[in-house]
Image (cartoon, rainbow, N blue to C red):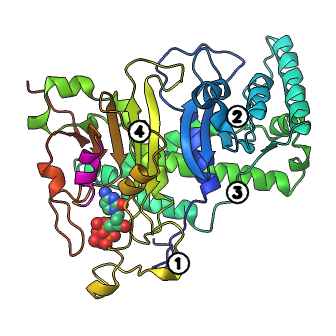
């Protein structure tokens, strides 16, 4: 069933995109063993001028806020920080001191967990003291510490469901299924929903209210505000789970170089599958900010430093991200939105839309260093306009959808990706043996 009227594609708001990214960063595959403790792992998105300039998560030794301080220092001034959990006082005092603009957090269990541990009541006492200190820091600083999440636009959940099921990765796996079906997708999605609800939602409503009161959100404890809040949270979790399921860890599927191209060297350079999948899901999230009514594309660039850093992301660090959209600052009516099936060449969208990879390169916040491994994750095959840009920028690896490879459409073609040499290309395929 299609819920959409042509030309009316729902978009994720920037605030919701950043909020979802913070939750998703909490789930960044751990490169080290994290002990079970009262301090929960948190994800963090650092935003400057409404652009992401940092993606981080806690490590075994440091909280996400501490990592942001180490990595950005005084550049945190005027940034907005989106946390997947309300940060503790140790982090907050330093962040406030750095002069950030706003701090948004997901309104469930904070970083220093308030989920009562029957076995150890003193830790809960400490957590309550920390929550008090956080409130005092908040009220005595000029920084806004708040919950910024917004209700999703109408039809967003349905739109994400429809488009996720049709995305390159699901279609590719479905083709290998007897009877060409996507049942595996529905199953995977249900599992993700359960998993993320248990992590990001407090199932017991009374317990949730208690926590909200302790962290200074008593005004959200009355209805209809409380039920609206929970509904917003549930919808966002649903969107995250649906998108995460669209790049599933399914049987022998993963991101590999095409059989004949895969050398042992490439095999060793390539990322662990779970990290590649994580980054591709970031790109999928970005695609829901597209301004193209028909085809949303997201791209994210990461690099792998020479050695592991203090970040929970290990040696990986964020370089830039983008989605396909009209030039910055343009208004809805400035450019044509039509594609080749609808209108004459002169009034089609293609000459005006800036591609996801182009935006990721333009608005990157770090240089691409030739001595390091850098990688771009794109939800769709890079087109002939973008392939030379990616290579020219010195990006070493491309992880992409490949459904369009070798296709020449009326205004956009995908011929160069297949022929591209000197950049390793990883697409979603079933495991192949490595040829040396
Ligand atoms: N690697 C890519 C590939 C495409 N795009 C963007 C540019 C356009 O906004 C849109 C074009 O997508 P399609 O090639 O799918 O063309 P249509 O949107 O016309 O769809 P169709 O497949 O029906 O031709 O995607 C992008 O940002 N990055």
Between discs 4 and 3, the one toward the N terminus:
3
What is the spatial separation of the Cα atoms under label 4 and label 3, in whole angstroms? 33 Å
Between discs 3 and 2, the one toward the N terminus:
2
Magenta segment boundaries in residue numbering: 385-393
Q: Is residue 414 magenta?
A: no
Between discs 4 and 2, the one toward the N terminus:
2
Q: Secondary structure beneath disc 1? A: helix
> Does residue 233 sit above or below 39 in this rendering?
below
Circle on res. 410: none
Provide the residue designation for mark 2.
85
Rendering coords of residue 320 (x, y %): 45, 45
Query: Is disc 3's CB within 8 Å of ligand 1?
Result: no
Circle on res. 367: 4
Q: Secondary structure beneath disc 2? A: loop
Provide the residue designation for mark 1.
332
What is the spatial separation of the Cα atoms under label 2 and label 1, in whole angstroms? 36 Å
Q: Which quadrant of the picture is home to ligand 1?
A: bottom left
What is the spatial separation of the Cα atoms under label 4 and label 2, in whole angstroms? 30 Å
Provide the residue designation for mark 3.
150
Q: Mark 4 against mark 2, which lies toward the viewer?
A: 4
What is the spatial separation of the Cα atoms under label 3 and label 2, in whole angstroms? 16 Å
Between residues 357 and 228, which one lies in front from this camera angle?
Answer: 357
Between discs 2 and 1, the one toward the N terminus:
2
Q: Mark 4 against mark 1, which lies toward the viewer?
A: 4
Is residue 170 toward the left or the right of residue 202 in the image? Answer: left
């Amino acid at each position: 069933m299609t819920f959409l009227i042509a030309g009316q594609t729902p978009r994720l708001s920037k605030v919701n995109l950043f909020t979802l990214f913070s939750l998703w960063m909490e789930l960044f595959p751990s490169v080290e063993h994290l002990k079970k403790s009262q301090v929960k792992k948190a994800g963090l998105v650092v935003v400057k001028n409404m652009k992401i300039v940092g993606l981080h998560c806690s490590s075994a030794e440091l909280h996400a806020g501490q990592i942001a301080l180490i990595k950005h220092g005084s550049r945190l001034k005027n940034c907005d920080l989106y946390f997947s959990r309300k940060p503790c006082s140790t982090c907050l005092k330093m962040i406030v001191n750095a002069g950030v603009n706003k701090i948004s957090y997901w309104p469930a269990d904070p970083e220093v967990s308030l989920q009562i541990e029957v076995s150890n009541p003193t830790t809960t006492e400490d957590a309550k003291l920390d929550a008090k200190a956080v409130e005092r820091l908040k009220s005595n600083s000029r920084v806004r510490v708040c919950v910024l999440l917004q209700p999703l636009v109408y039809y967003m959940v349905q739109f994400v469901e429809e488009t996720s099921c049709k995305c390159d990765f699901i279609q590719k796996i479905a083709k290998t299924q007897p009877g060409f079906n996507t049942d595996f997708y529905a199953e995977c999605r249900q599992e993700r929903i359960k998993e993320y609800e248990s992590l990001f939602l407090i199932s017991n409503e009374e317990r949730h209210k208690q926590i909200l009161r302790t962290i200074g959100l008593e005004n959200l404890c009355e209805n209809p505000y409380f039920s609206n809040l929970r509904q917003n949270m549930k919808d966002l979790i649903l969107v995250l789970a649906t998108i995460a399921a669209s790049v599933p860890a399914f049987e022998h599927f993963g991101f590999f170089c095409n059989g004949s191209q895969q050398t042992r060297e490439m095999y060793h350079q390539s990322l662990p599958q779970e990290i590649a999948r994580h980054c591709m899901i970031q790109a999928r999230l970005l695609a829901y900010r597209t301004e193209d009514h028909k085809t949303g594309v997201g791209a994210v660039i990461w690099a792998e430093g020479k050695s592991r850093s203090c970040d929970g992301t290990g040696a990986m660090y964020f370089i830039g991200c983008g989605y396909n959209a009209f030039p910055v600052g343009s208004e809805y009516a400035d450019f044509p939105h039509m594609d080749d099936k609808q209108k004459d060449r002169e009034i089609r969208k293609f000459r005006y839309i800036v591609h996801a990879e182009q935006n990721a390169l333009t608005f990157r916040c770090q240089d691409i260093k030739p001595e390091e491994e850098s990688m771009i994750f794109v939800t769709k095959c890079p087109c002939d306009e973008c392939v030379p840009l990616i290579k020219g920028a010195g990006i070493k690896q491309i992880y992409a959808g490949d459904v369009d490879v070798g296709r020449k459409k009326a205004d956009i073609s995908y011929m160069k990706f297949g022929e591209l040499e000197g950049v390793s290309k990883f697409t979603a395929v079933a495991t192949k043996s490595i040829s040396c």
